[in-house]
């Protein structure tokens, strides 16, 4: 008698990757205040760091990313006002990277590319 194939689910398997959510939602009530608080904490706590990877691992930064598509207009407005290292958060949330290779590492150019990306989608004025 041959063994029956197992119908047991493989719970150890990684879930399929989720596709990024479309970025269309306006910020939820209270979200702008929470974003500003987290952004302030992130900037304060990471001002001494030169590693963007370490900056992106900061708990406040990760919480901002976890806010999802609703925070994208706030990130874009912040980039427009004061270019900073929000690029990893935007890539993580949107699954996109509008920065041309020639602009990599040039903060103002990278910010401009993201702001233009947001402008084309009606996410930033």
Image (tube, rainbow, N blue to C red):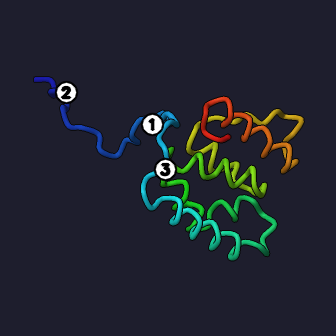
**Which residue, given by chain and number where applicable, does mark 1 sit on?**
18
Q: In x, y percent, where is residue 33?
A: 52, 65
The quadrant of the rendering that contains the N terminus is: top left
The quadrant of the rendering that contains the C terminus is: top right
Q: In the rendered view, would you say 85 is above or below 55?
A: above
Q: Residue at x 66, y 37 (%)?
A: 118
In the foreground, 4 or 60: 60
The mark lying in front, picked from 2 and 3, is 3
Q: For label 3, count other residues whose C-alpha is less than 10 Å away and answer few (under 14), some (14-19) or many (20+).
A: some
Q: In the rendered view, would you say 71 is above or below 8?
A: below
Label 1, secondary structure: give it. Answer: loop
Q: For label 1, count other residues whose C-alpha is less than 10 Å away and answer few (under 14), some (14-19) or many (20+).
A: few
Q: In x, y percent, where is residue 75?
A: 63, 51
Which quadrant would residue 41 be assigned to in this image?
bottom right
Which residue, as the protein is rendered here, is positioned at the far top? 1
**Which residue, given by chain and number where applicable, does mark 3 sit on?**
27
Q: In the rendered view, would you say 62 is above or below 25?
A: below
Q: Earlier in the sequence, mark 3 or mark 1?
A: 1
The mark lying in front, picked from 3 and 1, is 3
**Which residue, given by chain and number where applicable, does mark 2 sit on?**
5
Q: Earlier in the sequence, mark 2 or mark 3?
A: 2
Which residue, as the protein is rendered here, is positioned at the far front? 125
Which quadrant would residue 13 be assigned to in this image?
top left
Q: Residue at x 54, y 51 (%)?
A: 71
């Amino acid at each position: 008698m041959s063994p029956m194939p197992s119908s047991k689910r493989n719970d150890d398997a990684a879930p399929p990757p989720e596709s990024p959510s479309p970025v269309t939602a306006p910020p939820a009530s209270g979200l702008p205040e929470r974003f500003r608080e987290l952004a302030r904490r992130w900037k304060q706590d990471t001002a001494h760091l030169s590693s963007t990877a370490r900056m992106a691992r900061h708990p406040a930064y990760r919480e901002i990313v976890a806010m999802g598509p609703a925070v994208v207009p706030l990130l874009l407005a912040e980039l427009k006002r004061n270019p900073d290292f929000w690029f990893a958060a935007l890539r993580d949330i949107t699954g996109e990277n509008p920065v041309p290779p020639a602009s990599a590492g040039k903060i103002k150019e990278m910010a401009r590319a993201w702001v233009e990306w947001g402008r084309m989608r009606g996410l930033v004025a």
